[in-house]
Image (cartoon, grey):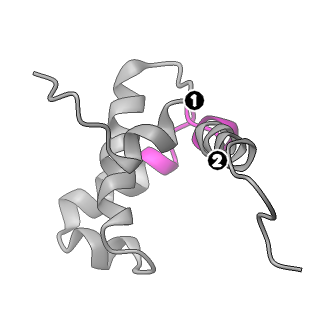
Amino acid sequence: MTTGIETWVDREVAGCEFNDERLGRRFCKLLGQVGSDMGQSIPLVYQDWANTKAAYGFFSNERVNEADILGGHFEATHERATTTEGPILPP
């Protein structure tokens, strides 16, 4: 069931294109978890071996590459930059 509420994760990964829909769902979950504890290592974010191993498994999956992960972020960043008026970075 969809609530219609879009989270920052939804917006950030909207442009991601994974070869398998399950990988996309897993990435959303990973990003949400890591984003909730920004700056921490994966073992500290997940705090148990099973979830830590699953996260490392996702990132080492041969069907996932840097372009898959960063594509949505680049698209979201471009969208934010083009809809912002004035300077984006201070001089």
Indicate the position of residue 75 as horizontal and vertical percent values.
67, 37
Indicate the position of residue 8 as horizontal and vertical percent values.
39, 49
Task: Give the labeled residue for mark 2.
Answer: 80
Indicate the position of residue 7 as horizontal and vertical percent values.
32, 45
Residue type beneath disc 1 = Gly
Q: Up-down: is 91 above or below 25? A: below
- Residue drawn 64% across and 47% down? 80
Q: Distance between the residues labelled 2 and 1?
A: 13 Å
Q: Closest to the observer: 36 or 90? A: 90
- Residue drawn 79% across and 71% down? 89
Q: Give the range drawn in magenta.
A: 58-69
31 falls in the magenta region? no
Quarter holding residue 33? bottom left
Q: Up-down: is 55 above or below 42? A: above
Q: Closest to the observer: 4 or 63? A: 4
67 falls in the magenta region? yes
Query: Could you tell me which quadrant the C terminus lies in?
Result: bottom right
Front of the two marks 2 and 1: 2
- Residue drawn 17% across and 70% down? 48
> At numbered mark 1, what does the secondary structure look like: helix, strand or loop?
loop
Q: In this view, does 68 lie to the left or right of 31?
A: right
Name the residue furthest left. Answer: 1
Query: Could you tell me which quadrant the N terminus lies in?
Result: top left
Which dot marks residue 15?
1
How packed mark 2 is, by other alpha carbons closer than 10 Å (few <14, some 14-19, many 20 or more), is few
Q: In this view, does 5 lie to the left or right of 20?
A: left
> At numbered mark 2, what does the secondary structure look like: helix, strand or loop?
helix
